Amino acid sequence: MTHTIQLLGEQTIYQARQTHTQLWQALHEHNEPLQLELAGVTEVDSSLVQILLWLVPEAKRLGRPLTMGEPSAVLAEVLAVLGLSAILQSEGAGHE
Amino acid sequence: MSEYDSALPAFLDEAHELLAAMESILMDVQGQQPDSEQLNAMFRAMHTIKGSSGLFGLDAIVRFTHEAENVLDALRAGELSFDDELNTLLLRCHDHVKAMLQELDHPDVLASMAAPPLIDELKAYFRQQTSGDISPLAASATEAPAAAEQSWLISLRFGREVLADGMDPLSFVRYLAESGELGGLQTISTQLPGGDAFDPEQCYLRFELVYHSAMPLAKLNDVFEFVRESSQIHIFPLATAGRYLATVTQGQDEAEQQAVAAAWQQLGVVIEAEAEVVTEAAAVEAVAPLASNLQFAQAAKQASGAVARKTEHKETKTTETRFIKVEASKLDNLINLIGELVIAGAAANLIARRSGQSAQIESTATIATLIEQIRAGTLSMRMVQIGEIFSRFPRVVRDVSKELGKSIELHISGAETELDKSMVEKLGDPLMHIVRNAIDHGIESVETRLAAGKSATGNVWLNAYHESGSIVIEVADDGGGLRKDKIVAKAVANGLISADAMLSDNEIYKLIFEPGFSTAEQISNISGRGVGMDVVKRGLEALRGTIDIDSAVGEGTNFRIRLPLTLAIIDGFLVQIGKSTFVIPLEVVVECIEVPDDLKSDGTHSHLNLRGEVLPVLNLSEFLELGEPPGKRQNVVVVNYGESKAGLLVDNLLGEFQTVIKPLGQLFSHLRAISGSTILGSGEVALILDVPALIEFAKQKEVADFAGQTEQGRAQLH
């Protein structure tokens, strides 16, 4: 069983609190591996980048396997510009 | 520490004044050439701030102002011509010094501001102007739109609140990418906390990026206009960026510093040691003229986190409001007015008391209390700490002792003692003479000291304290002491005293204040020409002060200067002699007693036995030649000044009275016993008695009487 979260539409500072809470709960309240779908993201700012930067080590810390799906073009471009494309490939500790 | 603390406000005061002058000159000359006076004034501003900063060990400010001073010096010498660009640069120098002055409490921040990119701009400008050939790099400095493309290293450390404030760090990167070419970007997120400490609405990001663009620096700066205040933004020419690693990581934790260093390496920046910045900056030929501007440097110094920044702003504000500069004449006017108010208040009080209406008496009493408080408050505004003068002595002692080859240590205490501002200014010279005299004549040479079994290092003490309404300043040394025999011999030789004069120790010592008197066998550069000590005497007399000397041969000398606290208003004690009223300063009054019978019966005896202590008594009516018959019930007011006491015989005691001192006219300036006049509530004039002079007179009379009696005794024996 995998717990899947889909991020959709605008993911900016306005959604940051909610998105973060959702991911925090997913990490703390479920035991299944976490799957994050990013293909539906249409608008991105630094806050989502930060959330991803927080999420990856946090999942590892909690021992929760984490996989991230293919990012939307917008997100992929942002991550590329920031030199952070690699974080999408990172997987949770549980897979090893 | 206390000297530092007390002198610092004066330094800040002066520095801000100089900066303000510089700014107003720069503002005035917009678009035209400054004249030599204006150039000198600007040079002086930087030069003086540099000098004073050096005294306080503020090396960062010294370093920066030195560069600014160089440019101004070249300008003064005509090597540079003044144009708008230089005007702007100098204004930014002014701003930078001002910013540095606000960071005195944060030495690490201050240090990081010593060599801002502004210095490189100054140097580049200097080179460009003096060499006459305008390099393409310099051309871009003048914001030419067609400038060649340049490479920059941009360091963007965003403030925590940037996201919440509606600004997206990403948007800056996007904008840059549109208007130029991103040559690489490294995201640093070491500040991003793990676990629950992460707040998704705070910004933890930092970007280090290489940017190629033809955009002039000023425009590039404008890009970050809105985040500049909360963030640390640095823009450096890529070629020289390597030296600024320490600047951009100032005050940050190790992880972040390492991450930035790694990022810079990734970006191809060659990191140089920070130490090279200062020494080699001038030598670097390929330096691009412009880097970041002052505000960036300001941003850089700010501690990360909005909270820290806010408190910092608050602190700045409080230091600004701690001092208000008021024109001295305004304060003098206020004090004069309060003097009048005191007189008017006393008159109202008198009338109220005569009317016998208790309500009126009460209300005038309340007003009197308030007037008293206003008076005290206003006078305290004029009070400054004596440390202001003391603080210049460590330097003097160091220089003079070096010159003389003596090793001298200066000990300062009581620097926080306050006295009237106008007196502080006039006290500087006399005190300087005494200190120099102590170093030169007081402290012996090292060999003599060692031979006398003393430590090789001589000591000079400066001390100040308040005592019975006056301020006492002591200058002591542990030197050779004053040689009484030498002084007397010299005084006799100079015809100052007769060979058989009987003088007290103190009187002998005071001879050194006579004009042309010097016992030093060798005349040194510093003192010994016999000018100086009489300057001291005159200077102190002008301040209504006195000087006492204690000395022991081989042990040292102690000069004790006693000065009134203020020159304007005193608490007086009213006495009546015949029909005239006199004021005795309350601070010298010890007690009042009825005239003892033995004194009354015999006019020739002018002594009083006060509980076993013999005091000379001065009959004021006689002394002042009032020609009034003595009153029926006379009183003695016991006064003291310094270590001397005396009784003053008066008719009536009228009580305390706040006295505004009105100086006597020139015509009466030679009067020794009267120090001023005042106006009573009733409108009558009362004279203020000069107690030190009266005591001196009473003592002399005592000595004369005693000498006369022994003469008589001897005559009778024969």
Image: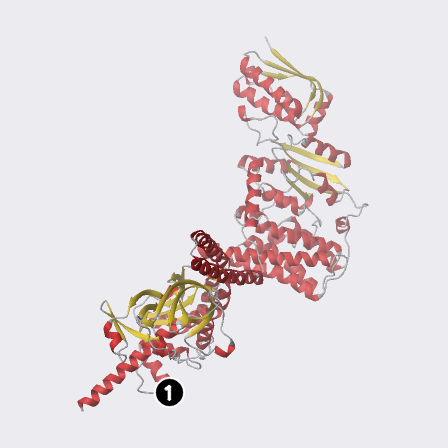
* Numbered disc total: 1
Residue placed furthest toward the top: A1
Quadrant in the picture for residue A78? top right
Disc 1 element: helix
**Which residue sits at x=56%, y=11%?**
A32
**Can you say which quadrant of the picture contains the N terminus of chain B?**
bottom left
Residue B699 in picture, x, y percent from top left: 32, 76
Q: Is residue A55 left or right of residue A78?
A: left
Q: x and y percent of residue B303 in the render?
A: 56, 40
Visible in this render: residue B416?
A: no
**Residue B51 horizontal side relative to residue A71, left or right:** left
Reading the image, the residue beneath label 1 is B493
Mark 1 residue crowding within 10 angstroms, few (<14) / some (14–19) / many (20+)? few
Name the residue: 34% across, 68% down: B639
Toward the right, the furthest residue is B146
Chain of the residue where label 1 is placed in the rendered structure: B
Residue B555 appears left or right of A22:
left
Residue sitting at the far bottom: B718
* Among the 4 quarters of the image, the one containing residue A37: top right
Quadrant in which the C terminus of chain B is drawn: bottom left
Query: Looking at this view, is B176 or B426 the one in front?
Result: B426
Q: How is the image coloured?
A: secondary structure
Residue B200 location, x and y as percent? 60, 25
The reply to whether residue B489 is visible in this rendering is: yes
Report the front residue among B256 and B678: B678
Using the image, determine if residue B159 lies above or below residue A22. below
Label 1 amino acid?
Ala
Q: Nearer the viewer, residue B568 or B5?
A: B568
Q: Is residue B200 above or below residue B230?
A: above
Give percent across and percent down for residue B586: 38, 64
